[in-house]
Every structure is written in structure tokens, then in C-alpha cells.
Image: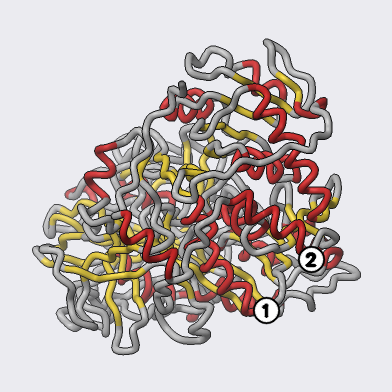
Amino acid sequence: MTATPRIRDLVPAALRARWVRAGYCPGRDVHALFREQARAHPGQDAVIDAERSLDYAALDREVDRIAAALDAAGVAPGDVVGLRMRNGWRLVVSELAVAAVGGVVLAYPADRGDRDTRGLLGRSRATAAIFGDPGDADGARALPHLRWVFTFGAGESGARSLDAAPASGWAARPVDAEAPVRILVTSGSEAEPKMIAYSHNAMAGGRANYVRALAEVARPGGPMRALVLMPLSSSYGSLVSHVAIAALGATAVLADRFDPDSALELVTRHRPGHLFGVPTMLRRLADRPPIPGEDLTSLVAVVSSSAPLSEVTARSAERRLGARVINVYGSSDGINCHTARTPGEPGAGLPDPSVAELRVVDERGVDVPPGTSGEILARGPMTPLSYVAAPELDARHRTADGWVRSGDRGLFDEHGRLHVLGRLRLVVSRGGRHISPAEVEREIAAHPSVLDVVCVGVPDADLGERLCACLSVAPGGGGSGSAGAQRVPGAARPGAPQAAGTAAGAAGAAAGTDREGLPPQHGGPRRRPLAHHRTWGNRMTRTAAARVDLGTSPRRTGSPGIRRGRAEIRPGRGAAGGDAGAGFPAQRLPAPHRTSGRRSRTASPGPAWRSCRAGRTRTRSPRASEPRCCSPNRSPACPAARCPRSTTGPPPRTSPHRGWRTWCGRAP
């Protein structure tokens, strides 16, 4: 008997049956659908990686071989099977083989140590695991519920190598289409990643309908051929094995890891019509110069998901790749909306009832009229069963009749298009007025020089809180001379209070928040607030290079809750030749320079400026080699020490990255 915890279906069974009758769900298990695809076009490419290419007939044989080995070992229907390996044909085969025996796939990243192995496999009570690296298998034997450990390659501690599994004419057994087949792992602000279970019908039905709509953009009625840049172990990557291949008969070209030049070379060599990636990948692809012999003419659609996509990145990717960019709003909780059917129109697209019905409700759960904001709820063929081993999350995020609470605030316009406004409870209270950071982010992101932006609340002695924006600016976007200080849409009138500094300093001013603690943008609950940053140990580095402080003018922009303010955008210097959007750690501030007197509206296109809010002193560190900790009372290098008004305010705040400070003394 399996030790796997029971996975409940929180959607009423009558609704599930109705979706099957409507044709939204196939009513068949994933392996049965895959076997049908293999018989229909056995010679078509199914999966291509750096090692080999498998057509559907060869992939079917490999799936039978691995499924027979799992079945012979004793893996039973309902058993959770952990998969830890990099992108490649072996991962696709393993996902399909686990589904074939009725197991539940729990795929998770292969490059984050063994913490996930202990945590995810332990909490899900996985009974089996397959590892791509035999070394990973050795540390999994201590898990009490893990009965079988398999590897590709020779392992130790009793691990069985699937490379040695013989060819088999294994006969599949029918599997309940409403049974779980895949657990998606999603990280958030919680200490432990969340696990969400999906059924065969939800994967091959609702999620397949969403991918089918994307496929129709390039080849109406024909099979999709797609280059997949994200890990298949991610929620976004789960659309490949059980969806694109098994349900839709697509060809998947897999990148084992992301590299811009390699990705462009894969497009030239394998001629995909679709490219799937995250915004950071698209930004880096757009920034790459053409390579010799490059041919991107096969691309018709570029799909972006998992993080907010700025207009600047979307336009740059369209120009560079010569293909339409489709933006997907969604989450691992079964929420989905995309712009495939609304090209060039505002918003996140039109909801598709064959994927998920969307509602916008008020605090009482009552639907609000178009133009009125509220919480976004979702329910449909794509809706997952429930959270795994987390009843408290089910209680928090699911309603009694199966709706998923997104935690996002949004509205429908008069044309039925969804507009996502940000997190429901993420507001900054500035002098008693509530401001949505996501709405301000959207206004700032409309500036052509802004690649990415995230707004955070910072303490204010007078107003309680004020809004601080951290920006990543396009190379050369800050201009020079009088163009250095530019007007940002929705920002303040001249004369409003303002501050400028490094984004790292801004992050430090925001109560020392780290990568996970920063608030998400308007893209959804589990999205990274700023694409172009990395964490190194306990320190955070950013390539963003500006702070914006919104003013107090009572005049408003077109979006409610947004104050007009003035912002100065000054470019920063990244580690890659001054490219603020390259996503690499920024260099230390160089070279001495100082300008005294009133605020200048000029800005150098080089390093980020530092300034005191009082406006009396603007300076840079004397030398990168001199002391970096600039306490006003200890170091003459600190400009705040030379500003007579800044000493009445709070002391300078230190950013998470040593050597960067922002002086934020406030005049009385």
C-alpha cells in the first residue's frame, strides 16, 4: 500500500464531467493520448536535444522500456515519483513513463543542492525517484518513504540504472483521467516551495487548450515545432511532455541550459516556429548581435511567461527575432490568460472558457461590473486538484465550489479584456492615501528607456511611507547632458520632492528586503519583481541604476491612486560593458567627481549618481579603493556629513551589497 498522502479534487465532480462532455477535456489518460500520437505520425520528430533526436516511434519504445522497469520494480498507480534531471530526452521519457504506470510526476530543478530532494520528496512522501546524475541519488536513500531509486548511469547505494533496462513490449493499463499525473512546484515568499497537483484531464485538456491556442498562431491545423528554453521541471516547462507532445503531437527542441548564442544557433539549425522563454531570456536574445549564418525566419511566435514582460523588452524581441511576442499571464494555481487572440491590444487578453473561466469579485465574493477592480478568480478545465500536503493553502486559496483565489487585483474592460493591476494586498500608504505599486510600475515602464521597474515602500518620518522605484535602464537610455533627467509618464511636476541613487541602495532602504522579499509586479503572485538581478551568497547585486521618488501633487494620472511626480533616470553601469539590462552584477562606483550647489539636471551616461535628498550636495565616492562604509560621523568621504540639513534625518542606509550606499537624510 502506498504511503503517498491523499490528493483531493476540490472542483465538484459534476463540473469535471461537464467539461469532458463539452470537449474541453479528453477523458483519457496522458499515456493513451501519447500512444495515439505515436501511431498517427511515427516518423515525426518528437524531441530533439544536444545528444540525439527521437521521432515518435523511437520515443514510444523508450517510454515502454522505462515504464516496464518501473512497473517491474513495484511502482503503483498513485505513487509520487520524483524526477531530478536537466532538460533532455531522458526527462521527457521519464515523465511519460511515470504517467504510463499511473504514477504522479514530481519534477524539480537539478541545480539547487539536495535541499529540494529532502524537502519535496519528503513532504510528498514520494516512493520512487529518478536522477539524471548518479551522485544525486546517493543522498536520497535516507528518506524513509523512498523505496526505489533509479538513475541514468551507474549509481551507488543500491540505485538501479535505467540505462540497463531491456527493451520491452510493455502493455499499458488504463488510468483514471481524473487521477493526478503531475505536481507543479512553485516557489514564493514561503519558506517551503508549494506543490500543486494536476490531473490527466487538466494537463491534456485545459493546459493543452491553452498551448493549442498558441500553436494556431504559427501553424493553424498543423503540429507545433517549438524551441523550449526554460527548464522542463518548472511550472512553465510542464507544458512540454504531457501537453505539447502527448496531447498535441508537437516537436520539442530542448536547450539543456540557456545561452543566447546557443539559442539563436538552435533556431537556425532546427527551424522552430515557436520560441518559449521568460522575459530575461528574451531581453538577452534581443541584445545579442547577429551571428554569422544566422537565420531566424522560421520563427512566427515568441511566447513569454513566468514574469512580467515590459513593453521595451517585447518591442526589442520582436525587432530582433522578427516574430510576434505573446505574453502569458498565469500561475501554477491554474490561472491563465494570454494575448494570442488580441495582438496589439491592451491588457492580458481574453479569457478562454476551454482553459479557465475568470471572474473579478469584491471583498464579499460578488462579481463587479466592467471597469471596477477586484480580486481575480479562476476555475475551469485547467484548474488543479489541490495543494499537496498543505490543507492550509487549500483553505486560503480555494473556495468551497472550486474557484482559485489568485490574490491579484484586476478588472475587465468594456471589451472583456483582462487587465492585471497588481497584488491585492500590496499597497503603499502614503500620508493616508493608498497607492498601488503595480500601477506606478506600469506608468514608469511606458518610458522607452526603462527595461524593468519594481516599486517598493520605504519608511518616511512625515508621511509614514513613500514609494521608491528601482529601474533597469536601457543602454544609453539615460542620455547625456540636459537629456539626463527625463520626464517619466505619470511622474511628478517640477518642484516635487525627489531623490536619486543606486537601485541597490533603494533596495537597502526598503527595510533590507532580499530577492524573495521584494513585492511581485502586476504579472502574478509568483513572479520575480525585477528580472535583471542575481543573488550571490547573502548579498544582492542589481543592474538597475535609478531611484524615483514620487511627489505629492494632488493631480492624478489616468490610473487611480498614482501621483504625479518627477523622476530622474540616470543610467548605471553593469559588469558587461555598461549594459544595465544584461543581468550581471554591477561594478563598484569609480573615480572621484563632485558637483556642489543646486541640483543639476544633467547626468553622465556612466556610473550611477548619489545624492542627498536635501539637494545640497551631490557627490561620488572618492575612489573605489577608499573606505566604503561612509558613516557621517566617522568618514569625511560621506557626502551626508557635508550636508548641514541631512544630519537632522535618519542615518544613511546600507544596501545589501557592500560598497554601495544611498544617502537619504531628509530635510525637516
Q: Secondary structure at mark 1?
A: loop
Q: Nearer the viewer, residue 474 or 114?
A: 114
Q: What residue type is disc 1 on?
A: Gly
Q: Is label 2 or label 1 in front?
A: 1
The image position of residue 316, as x and y in percent, is 62, 75
Q: Which residue is mark 1?
A: 221
Other-residue count near label 1 (Cα within 10 Å), few / some / many at <14 / 14–19 / ≥20: few
Q: Nearer the viewer, residue 587 or 342?
A: 342
Q: Is residue 243 above or below residue 446?
A: above
The image position of residue 20, as x and y in percent, is 44, 64
The residue sitting at 9% across, 63% down in the picture is 432
Q: Is residue 84 above or below residue 314?
A: above
Q: What residue type is disc 2 on?
A: Val
Residue 598 sits in quarter = bottom left
Q: Secondary structure at mark 2?
A: helix
Residue 264 sits in quarter = bottom right
Task: Give the distance between the C-alpha atoms of the residues marked 2 and 1, in whole angstroms.
Answer: 22 Å
What label does residue 267 carry, if any?
2
How many dots with numbers?
A: 2
Q: Nearer the viewer, residue 129 or 134?
A: 129
What label does residue 432 carry, if any?
none
> In the image, 516: left or right of 473?
left
